[in-house]
Amino acid sequence: MKIAICDSFAKKIINETHLILKYILEKDESEMRNMVNKCLEIDIDMLFDEKFYFKQGYLTPISVLPPNVRPDINHNYMIIQVSCGCKIIKEKGKSCGFCASYDKVDYYEKTIEELESHILKLWTSHKICISNSNCVFLADGDPLASEDILIYIEIIKSMLPQILYFESFISTKTILSFSRQQWNELKKLGLRKVYWGVESADETTLRIIGKPQSLSMIQNAKMILETNKVDYDIIVLSGVGGLLNKNRSLEDVIKNPHVFNTSEFINDSNCSSVFISRLQIPPYSNMSLKIDKGILYPLSDDEMEQQYRSMVKHINKDVRGSYGNQFVIERIEDFEI
């Protein structure tokens, strides 16, 4: 089985699927005929045309989602883009060192009119899927930081009354900025869970990866989430422990401050579950430039796997596997099934 994380490979797979569906349509006279016809009506090229997404009110393509949120996997979700890009880039002038997802996207918060138009277009083009959804995942990077987030949610609920819940990514800075009243208002409107990019609970590692937070900040943020009874999942990185050590041993890879401090932080938390991302450094990212200068030394594939396994071993929470290859530009892998 081939898993494609690249438009060209994905398009090839979809074309092959269409051929299979056509064969079924020719041979099968059952009730599946109508379902197959609907599948074949889809314009494949349209799915890879950014203009299509713009027509649905997505001002930029949705590049990063938690794996359990993807509508093609979990039909309870729909994605509504209330802001575009990442507010961290706007404030810092650069992205986190390991991320290039929003490098070419100017941060933008939608107007009320744009959001209403976005919802109407989605309802028109995906009525059946949306009518069966009961949860909205808010996009993009840190949408709860939007100044009008409460208004956005109220508009969504008024236009889509079947929506009961909301989920979202959230940054440490946004967690720290909310008052108890704001958390209560969000929960009252249906906030069900936030996905928090902690990445590491080691001070040195946080500086290496360019994450705009300190250990004390994430400790305070954890306390705020738990005091306000907000359900949250934690996202962390493997592959960032030992990057400064050119001549590291296996012991350095599996036993280092990043592995121990991050695992301890998670174990002391009340998070629902943990996603562990294997570090993949995009070309031209801040960390990539440091590698070119000989400041950082990336882990080999074997070292990456060993550190990943070490983190899983030390974490006593529900580890839900790798967060995925959300920063990979082109990749195809073969899996035996």
Image (tube, rainbow, N blue to C red):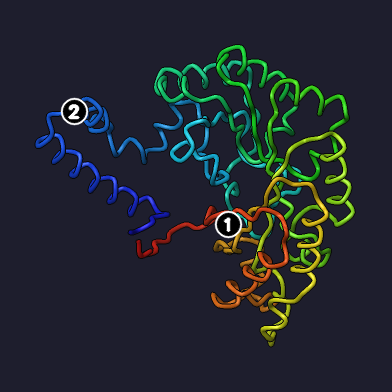
The residue that appears at 78% across and 68% down in the rendered structure is 260
Residue 139 is tagged as none
Residue 20 position (above or below residue 162): below
Q: Secondary structure at mark 2?
A: helix
Of 310 and 67, the residue lying toward us: 310
Quarter of the image with the N terminus in it: bottom left
Residue visible at 62% across and 40% down in the picture: 85
Q: Quadrant of residue 51?
A: top left
Q: Residues within 10 Å of mark 2 (few under 14, many from 20)?
A: some
For residue 31, side relative to residue 227 (left or right): left
Q: Eyeballing the image, is 45 above or below 94? A: above
Looking at the picture, which amino acid does disc 1 mark? Gly
Q: Which residue is mark 2?
A: 33
Residue 5 percent across, percent down from the top left: 42, 54
Q: Residue at x 65, y 77 (%)?
A: 297
Q: Quadrant of the C terminus?
A: bottom left
Badge 1 element? strand
**Residue nearer the viewer, 117 or 309:** 309
Check disc 1 and report the residue beneath it: 321
